[in-house]
Amino acid sequence: MIGVAIPAHDEQAHIAAALAAVQAASQHPALAGEAVRVVVVLDDCTDATARLAREAGAWTLPIAARNVGSARAAGADWLLAAGARWLAFTDADTRVDERWLAEQLALAADAVCGSVAVDDWSVHGVLADALQAHFASHYTDADGHRHIHGANLGVSAAAYRQAGGFAPLACGEDVALVDALERGGARIAWSARPRVWTSARTQARARGGFGDTLLAMRGGLCAETVGAEPILVGIAPEGATAAGAMGQYATVRSG
């Protein structure tokens, strides 16, 4: 069985589309009918996310951590207990391609780190075109990239267990897991083949995550308009080595 875990905190605006995309991916012919179980981890949700997730056919798991690392870990544990051999992770504001799961498995690795694309930059108003161009010029969306995104991550059950699972981090839980996988000698595919499209929303759910990185880029562009040198920052947890400080969107630098 293949498991898909999606952390969510008040995601009623996005969860239905995210689950419809996962459902399509779960029915890809290359999976040969293997069961796919989807769990939405409802992390302190107060809106209609739970109802919409259940209506879309997903299992739901309520927690009250307000912590994305804890939410991903809870989803993984639930799926492992259900017998999953492969764990795939994405986000509630993300739509996966119909070949997403098939491509992860076809790479025949212990873990797959996929890239991300943004489907709509318009929320950034007059800066949308400039922000899109800046992102495209700094982000490597091709095989051999060194990005780590919880929105596009897959790992075998055995490798996940060996690595110790997700740490309860408010940000960078994906980076910490990949670090642990690397230290354990896991075979990691850094691939752009499993495709996902995520939002460019301005209200990030995880402080220091992808949304905040985009806001930092936007701040740099604003500074540039008044003659200042833009400073673009990415935030990784203390001690992270696999992605480095710019791991959210730029080419990875170790250390």
Image (spheres, rainbow, N blue to C red):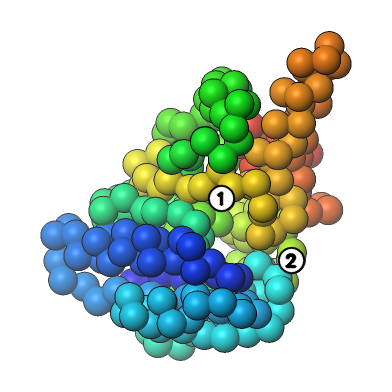
Q: State whether residue 221 is above or below residue 33.
A: above
Q: Could you tell me which secondary element the residue under label 1 belongs to?
A: loop
Crowdedness near tag 2: few (<14), some (14–19) or many (≥20) residues, C-alpha within 10 Å: some
Image quarter in which the N terminus is found: bottom left
Rendered image: mark on residue 169: 2
Q: Residue at x 57, y 29 (%)?
A: 128
User: Residue beneath label 1, please?
Assistant: 149
Residue lying at 19% horizontally and 65% vertically, measured from the top left = 27
Vertical comparison of 160 with 122: above or below: below
Query: Dot 1 surroundings within 10 Å: few (below 14), some, or many (20 or more)?
Result: many
**Residue at 78%, 54% in the rendered image:** 237
Of 168 and 56, nearer the camera is: 56
In the picture, the quarter occupied by the C terminus is top right
| Of residues 248 and 202, the one drawn nearer to the viewer in this rendering | 202
User: Residue 218: image x %, image y %?
Assistant: 70, 31
Element marked by disc 2: loop
The label on residue 85 is none
Of all residues, the one furthest to the top in this rendering is 227
User: Measured from the top left, where is residue 80 in percent x and y?
Assistant: 46, 81
Can you say whether 117 is above or below 211 in the image?
Answer: above
Whether pointer 1 and pointer 2 mark residues with C-beta atoms closer than 8 Å, the reply is no
Distance of label 1 from label 2 (alpha carbons) = 14 Å
Query: Residue 81: image x %, image y %?
Result: 46, 88
Q: What residue type is labelled 2?
A: Leu
In this rendering, does residue 106 appear at all?
no
Residue 168 location, x and y as percent? 72, 71
Amino acid on which disc 1 is placed: His
Give the side of residue 175 with respect to residue 193, left or right. right
Q: Residue furthest front?
A: 126
Is residue 225 shown to the viewer in this render?
yes
